[in-house]
Amino acid sequence: MTTLTTTDALRVTGIAKHFGPVTALRDINLHVGYGEVLGLVGDNGAGKSTLIKILTGFQPPDAGTIAINGVDVKLRSVEHARELGIETVYQDLALVNELSVYHNMFLKREVRIGPFLNNAVMRKQAREYLDQMGVRIPSVDVEVAKLSGGQRQAIAIARAVSSNAKILLLDEPLAAMGAKEGAQILDLIRRLKAQGVSVIMIGHNYAQVVEVCDRINLLQRGEITFDKPVGPNSMEEITDIIMQEYRASKFGPTPASA
Amino acid sequence: MANEALAGPPAAPPNGALQTLQNFWRFIVQQRTLSVALIALVMVVYFQFSKSVFLSLGNLQTLAAYTAATAIIAAGEVMLLICGEIDLSVGSVFAMAPFVMYYANQNGIPLLGGIILALLVSAAVGFINGFVSVYLKVPSLIATLGTQFLVSGATLIATNATPVITPDTFPKVTSFAQFFGNNPYSEIIWAVAIVLVMQVLLSLTPWGLRTVATGGNPLGASEVGIGTNRIKMVHFMVASALGGFAGILEAYRITSTDPLAGGTTIMFNAVAGAVIGGTALNGGSGTVVGALLGTIVLGILQDGITLIGINADYYYVVLGAAILAAMILNVRLQILRKAGR
């Protein structure tokens, strides 16, 4: 039902995760094509964060398989997922305020001369990379604390992609951002898409998700209940489903389990 | 936008005097290491004019001796403070370590082996500090308060609270003892070397970068894949080992090993030195050189007050005021940092 390239960059089949008696994820099936932007929406507690943690190798799933480029993989750690090309930009951006932009961009994969940091090379590469991605900041020597929310988000995304990410997970990339800055980030996502990067964008704001995504998945109580390409009626369709869910939880006989 | 704030000072300041004052304030807050060095210099000049013996060789040696051990402890403490932790037990490890060396030596282990053993035992205390703080999630302020009393008490019991003569210092001081603190210059050379190595580790290596990240944004650092627990564990062990090493150097310098040496006084002096040198207590910022300068300032102050002949208790009044002033500056710096956002 969806238009896809020949193979999926990422395909997730039957993922489940429990925390004691709590079922966080029930039976997750999702896929992203090359250069596709998938919007993953859902309310708080729907299981988004758990799914991200599994896809980044932070936690193993209880059941199910993850395939990258059609090959089944077991993500052993964050590093391992990263080696396979999965990068995540978290809501807190994982930026260190006290460090410069270029140190942030190379954190955990620093360029060295012997045991020492090769600051000249990192500074130059960070500059080049940000220019190439159209991210505008006054200087890469600036402490990250001095940048605006949009600049910080752009740097976090640039850092993720500069490590050769093929599949990029963005957790609420537009949260707490002005309209202009938000538009810049959406532009950045479009540029990544043009470069063939697959993006999973997690969001609350359905309008923004619809604006940039090719396809939308809705996550409810640990299950994906909606999977359609973005069309002119996407907003209404999703809103309808969520309203149904809301009425069911408020008036219906079955209480939410997650 | 932030870009404009970063573009530099506005072309024509409306009020020159106010602008100068603001710039001066910014300088003090941002160029912390330099400011502390200037304060040290001003104090040296003042005390030299008040008492000309201040810059005499004898007094400088006293000053170096006072500063060295504290600076070594501060070097380890700063790294812990940068990654968001603290160690209150270093002072007790300071007293314990030379006794480990002493008893090892009494049992036939050569002195160098004794020192290595003492450093290992010190690091083990750091390991316990780290384990309780990092894995059992007890705030290090409390965890190390516990080990402070524990180690202190254990040392007093094991030694019957009686000082001993440091090996190799009686009846004749050997070159081994000279090397490990007895020579008037030995201890300060050790201190400067350790401070330099730690500062290089902090500012020029990936390890240092990750240490700052661990304290600056613990969650973010672990999301990037930094093993923040391991980093903290290592810093706990290094801080404790440095505390033990400082204790051994002091035992050689004063030729007697006292179970009541060090304690909370030297530990708090080290923390005060670090704070005055610009280390924020909530992690993410600080320099080892700054801590050394902060320690030197405290040393000059204490020494100078004694020389001038003022009641030495005034030292504590000034120390308290200095800590408060330094902490206010540290907090201002953080606010200034975030203001550009």
Image (tube, coloured by chain):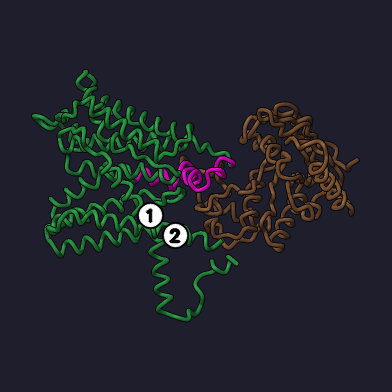
Q: List the single residue furthest toward the right.
A: A1
Amino acid carrying mark 2 in the image = Leu
First-in-chain label (2 vs 1): 1
Residue drawn at point x = 69 percent, y = 51 percent: A173
Q: Position of residue A45 (x, y in %)?
A: 71, 41
Labels 2 and 1 in the same subunit: yes
Q: Is B149 placed left or right of A192 in the picture?
A: left
For the record, the magenta segment spans: B196-223
| Disc 2 residue crowd, few under 14, some 14–19, many 20+, Cα 10 Å | some
Q: List the single residue furthest toward the left.
A: B171
Q: Are marks 2 and 1 in contact (CB under 8 Å)?
A: yes
* Residue A174 sits in quarter: bottom right
Colour for chain A in the figure: brown
Amino acid carrying mark 1 in the image = Gly
Residue placed under numbered mark 2 in the picture: B333
Query: Is B140 in front, or is A213?
Result: B140
* Residue B225 sits in quarter: top right
Query: Is B306 in front, or is B57?
Result: B306
Residue placed under numbered mark 1 in the picture: B278
